[in-house]
Image: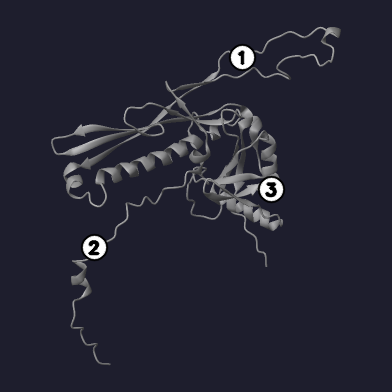
Amino acid sequence: MADKAPINALGRRAAYQLADVTKTRPQFGSLTPRWLTRLLEFKGLDAGIYRVNRVVEGETPLDVLCSQDPGKSEIPQGYVEYQARPREYELSSISTIVNVDTGVADVYSSPYDQVGEQLALAVESLRERQESQIVNNDDYGLLKNVSEGQRVKPRYGAPMPDDLDELLTKVWKDPSFFLAHPRAIAAFERECTRRGVPPATAEIAGGTFILWRGVPLIPTDKLFVDGLKNPRGKTGKTNILLLRTGEQKRGVVGLYQTGLPGEQSRGLAVRLRGVDDKGLASYLLSLYCSVAILADDAVGVLEDVEVGDYYDYR
């Protein structure tokens, strides 16, 4: 076969030198939608401390008289007791420092500002860590603060409709949403398919979610599978949370600090620390956050569910 004759025209490699390249902003592969922090109600604090005052529980807060004629009986007297030592939540800080060479930023900031892009990626990283801390923090995290009476075990291992029904009995006062790893949601959908009860779907806050008994299942990789966000194997165990959110509902409330110097967004401050003799600019990013559970029945958890059960439908 004869050699292909060369083309007597400008080649691609040379032409590339005169071409404009359309570029994207830096893409952060580990970003998630962070549905939890988008759906959670947040409360701004002035002094970084949130005290949850509770009433001492009893059969009824007060004895009352139920009669059409109060004069026939003596009206009971009493008062409602408060907890003597209510829990106080102090905001936790998540911080990082970003360094930017001012010479690089001066010369290479078109079409995208180098300082702005560096800070934007750092902010996204802090927000990811915030959502993880809301779920997993050893002090205030949701998993660590579920009361013993609000913990449920699966019947057989995989998350079944009966298991989520049992979880709903623990958080039955206006539940807001389930929270689960995507692998756990997929495992639940397989169990529903096996039983011929495929769950309905709904659009919430711009996303499409499956529902169980009218309550959405919200995905997050912050509820780990065998301690990992992205497990490599098909098997593994995880937890499924059910939350009631909002201060008015005596639910779960996210906390943040208001009025920060250099505030960029909710609870997040960015401060220029200075520029050194070599022209290196340093920025401190600080995010102040926590989460409070106002009543024990605002959170329940289905523990140690297996995500690796598959079925052959042939």
Q: In this view, does 113 lie above or below 55?
A: below
Q: Where in the figure is residue 193, as x and y percent of width and height?
A: 67, 57
Picture quadrant where residue 81 is located: top right
Would you call the spot at circle 2 few (<14 residues within 10 Å), some (14-19), or many (20 or more)?
A: few
Q: Name the residue under label 1.
A: 82
Q: Which of 83 and 314 is in front in this view?
A: 83
Q: Earlier in the sequence, mark 2 or mark 1?
A: 2
Q: What residue type is labelled 1?
A: Tyr
Q: Earlier in the sequence, mark 3 or mark 2?
A: 2
The nearer-to-camera label among 3 and 2 is: 2
Residue 153's tag is none
Q: Mark 2 points at which residue?
A: 20
Q: Quadrant of the N terminus?
A: bottom left
Q: Which residue lies furthest to the left in this view?
A: 277
Q: Name the residue under label 3.
A: 161
The answer to whether residue 68 is left or right of residue 52 is right
Q: Where in the figure is residue 54, as x and y percent of width and height?
A: 60, 19
Would you call the spot at circle 1 few (<14 residues within 10 Å), some (14-19), or many (20 or more)?
A: few
The answer to whether residue 8 is left or right of residue 220 is left
Marks 2 and 1, how far apart at CA: 69 Å
Q: In which quarter of the image is the C terminus?
A: bottom right
Label 3 sits on a secondary structure element that is: helix
